[in-house]
Image: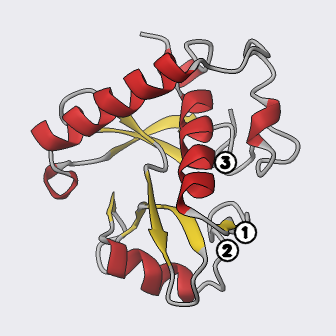
Amino acid sequence: MERGKPILSDPTRFSEGYPLLSQQKPTQTEREALQAREKQYYIDHPQSSLELTPTEFTSPYGMPVYKDQFGMNHSESTDTFKLPDGRWTTAPMIWPDPQTGKARYFTRPETIEFLGGHGWSNPITGEKIPMFGSEPEASSWAVDRDMTLQDKNLPFNRR
């Protein structure tokens, strides 16, 4: 898979799913289980402590896939938050460090500054960062997108 070329014809329309995915929407239980697993992972392994190494893979959304020192994959890990203008967003947190060029998790303020400097567009994929009217809408979007990235048929999830 070529880096920077999304598999999906329109990566912002993630709910249509990755072509190999079952078209069945994940259950609420599956969504909650994913959220609980990820929350626990980041409690056990704070983002600031993770060392990200590039892999040969790219996500269906065109983002590079990295592996941390514990063997876990990361591609865009998002944060959902309210902007000063009242809109909500779900933004990727993994970007190349401006000084070292190595991928790392940005803090929320760093993410806001970085994406604001790019007109709220993803500089890797060109995708506009989504904006929402409410936190539940933004969070649901993030979980749906994350569920797509967990598909075992994706090359970077085959172990």
Pick whichever, 106 or 124, lies toward us: 106
Query: Residue 155: x, y in percent?
Result: 58, 19
Q: Which residue is mark 2?
A: 121
Scheme of image coloration: secondary structure
Residue 147 occupies which quadrant of the picture? top right
- Which quadrant of the figure contains the N terminus? top right
Considering only vertical position in the picture, is 83 above or below 136? Answer: below
Residue at the spot 59% in from the left edge and 45% down from the top edge: 140
Considering only vertical position in the picture, is 97 above or below 114? Answer: above
Residue at the spot 51% in from the left edge and 81% down from the top edge: 83
Numbered circle sitting on residue 62 = 3
Q: Could you tell which of marks 1 and 3 lies nearer the N-terminus?
A: 3
Amino acid type of the residue that numbered disc 2 sits on in the rendered structure:
Ser
Q: Could you tell which of marks 2 and 3 lies nearer the N-terminus?
A: 3
Residue at the spot 75% in from the left edge and 14% down from the top edge: 24
Query: Residue 50: x, y in percent?
Result: 20, 48
Q: Closer to the camera: disc 1 or disc 3?
A: 1
User: Marks 2 and 1: in contact by CB < 8 Å?
Assistant: yes
User: Considering the numbered disc 1 on the image, is that residue within a helix, a strand or a loop?
Assistant: loop
Amino acid type of the residue that numbered disc 1 sits on in the rendered structure:
Lys
Amino acid type of the residue that numbered disc 3 sits on in the rendered structure:
Gly
Numbered circle sitting on residue 128 = 1
Q: Is residue 114 visible?
A: yes
User: Considering the numbered disc 3 on the image, is that residue within a helix, a strand or a loop?
Assistant: loop
